[in-house]
Amino acid sequence: MCPLKTTTAVKHSKTTHFEIEILDAHTRKQICIVDKVTQTSTIHDVKQKFHKTCPKWYPSRIGLQLEYGGPYLKDYITVQSVAASSIITLYFTDLGQQVGWTTVFLAEYSGPLLIYLLFYLRSSYIYDVKESSRWRRHPVVHLACFCHCIHYIRHLLETLFVHKVSAGHSPMKNLIKGCAFYWGFTSWMAYYINHPRYTPPSFGNRQIIVSAINFLVCEAGNHFINTVLAHPNHTGSNACFPSPNFNPFTWMFFLVSCPNYTYEIGSWISFTVMTQTLPVGIFTILMTIQMSLWAQKKHKIYRKKFNSYVHRKSAIIPFIL
């Protein structure tokens, strides 16, 4: 008799796979089925598989929802976290043509810079030639051009080298709306400020100098705040609440949750006082309203995550808002 051979039990790891049915959110008709999706796969991985099946839809155009009308699932969400069973139904919406956030910011900021310089350097092509040669420009016109250029050059450089821009995308229509807003208001402002008949501020050099200094202080403060916010400790899911450091410009964190918006509004208020023009004032009011909404939204998020740090702070305007 042959001796019995001892057999060792081999443990096979059992991996759960999901089957994802993707339906059109509007017609409820099935588009495709994505199978062999692992537990650790993310929504981004599902979009990649969906794109392979339906190449006409790029991952950035794909919006997936658990239920019709619900929020779009973020790319980093795992499939396992939304799965009630091994078969998952997701609703697809074509988000349209998308562009990266860096492209959005560069387009929105480069336009105002070039448009303003066009009005400043080529006034004879825009205004009446005789009128342009007859009236001598007030020094505040040159100072306004300098400040305006400084503002948007800072934004462009920070977009390229400071900000941790999201890898996500924005719909093309948002880019068009943003550019129309910034470019349109810049054209309106530049037309008035560089006009041959432009009237300088009522209180003369004192008003100009004080507001120009305040403008530069706010620009510097905005830059230093953005530098702090770009630090690895303040980005990502494990971020800690930004705190002031030895730089006095960062001490605004003691008072508000979003000092970058505070400084931004301060810059535009200063520019409004310095130029004393209606278009700049209207733009400042609209920007203040929009940034207040953004700041309050961020403030609520900060209060949920870092309540002990921000419960006594204001969102954007110290002691007021």
Image (cartoon, helix red, strand yellow):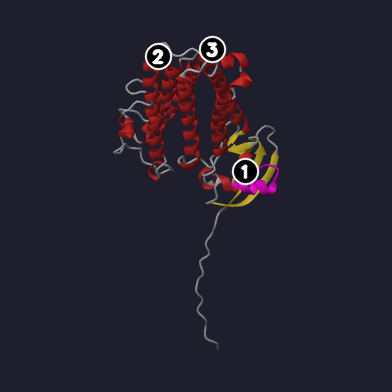
**Where residue 319 is drawn, which disc sits there?**
none
Q: Tell me the kind of residue under disc 1.
A: Pro
Callouts 3 and 2 close, C-beta under 8 Å: no
Viewport quadrant of the C terminus: top left
Tell me if 136 is positioned left or right of 225 in this view: right
Question: What residue is shown with label 2?
Answer: 204
Magenta stretch: give its range: 46-58
Q: Secondary structure at mark 3?
A: loop
Front in this rendered view, residue 78 or 176: 176
Q: Quadrant of the N terminus?
A: bottom right
- Work out whether mark 2 precedes mark 1 in sequence or the reverse, and give the earlier one: 1
Front one among 53 and 267: 267
Tell me which numbered mark, 3 or 2, is placed earlier along the sequence.
3
Residue bearing mark 1: 59
Residue 167 in sight in this render: yes
Viewer-nearest of discs 1 and 3: 3
Q: Nearer the viewer, mark 2 or mark 1?
A: 2
Taking the magenta stretch, the answer to whether it contains residue 106 is no
